[in-house]
Amino acid sequence: MSETLEGLVIAHLGQGIAVEHNGDIILCQPLRKLDTVTVGDKVLWSLVAPEQGRIEALLPRRSVLARPSRNDKIRPVAANIDNVFVVFAVEPYCDFLLLDQYLAICENRNFRASLVLNKTDLPLSDEIEQELAHYESLGYALYRVCANNVDSLAELKHALRGQVSIFTGQSGVGKSSLTNALIPDKKLKTNTVSATTKHGRHTTTAATLYHLPEGGDLIDSPGVAIFGLADISRGQLAQGFREFQLFLGQCQFNDCNHNQDKGCAIRAAVESGEISTPRYLRFLKLHEKM
């Protein structure tokens, strides 16, 4: 029987799963009894043929980012993430509703969340600056970058060191440009992963994990643009707004919807200026969406 080794899942390929071990990439098939293996997972695997392996066991995860899939099931997108970086930009437009949705999910899943404003060469309105200042006052780190300007990435590169991160955000905000700027040899690395399939092309259908030159890992996942509210409750949505947490136990009724309910401590905090009105209105929109 082959020796069992520890490896890191770096990509899902059409023909199997790419597992990295000591710098080598081995194409593996998981045992059928295993739960869904995803990018970022640490696994135990064994060699079954030259350059072919079998995943024997899934090692415990410290976190998992999931999204709804068919038949009301939840499908893992990536595992062992430390920080979710929500990327947004003035163009196409600053979608603060989507941003709040991502942050609420991160709060509920115990992911650290940070904000990345891309395309800083474009002018910002006072209204947007006020919103950004509010997020910073809530304790969210904000990185202002321009994918075309290497100097603007220094602070973000430092923040990515020593941890596993993933970018998310609406389409068109420049996530790919940013990833390409942070991983200059991304194409070369992608081709190395592709070589394990023997088809000479990258057949990744989901996420791919890259090692950053300055240290740390970045999971690039095109499909993460929509991780939704399907698996959190209305109560958890309110819990996902940091500034609400202080007031949640003070409402007159336990099942308070924080809207027109009598004795709502959240609404009272909005009226007294302790909670931002725009954020509260976006909470109501997300509440309605659920």
Image: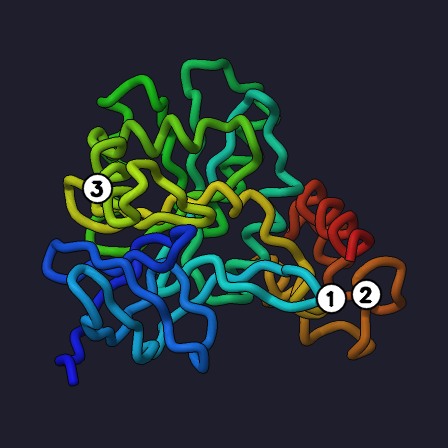
- Mark 3–mark 2 Cα distance, whole angstroms, equals 52 Å
Residue 149, position as x, y percentages in the image: 29, 18
Identify the image quadrant of the C terminus.
bottom right
Name which of mark 3 and mark 2 comes first in the sequence: 3
Closest to the camera, between mark 1 and mark 2, is 1
Going by the numbered disc 3, the residue's amino acid type is Thr
Name which of mark 1 and mark 3 comes first in the sequence: 3
**Which of the 4 image quadrants contains residue 70?**
bottom right
Q: Residue at x 67, y 45 (%)?
A: 279
Which residue does the numbered mark 3 point to in the structure image?
192
Identify the image quadrant of the N terminus.
bottom left
Going by the numbered disc 1, the residue's amino acid type is Arg
Which residue does the numbered mark 1 point to in the structure image?
234
Of residue 22 and residue 84, the one placed in the foreground of this image is 22
Q: Is residue 55 positioned above or below 67 on the image?
A: below
Which residue does the numbered mark 2 point to in the structure image?
257
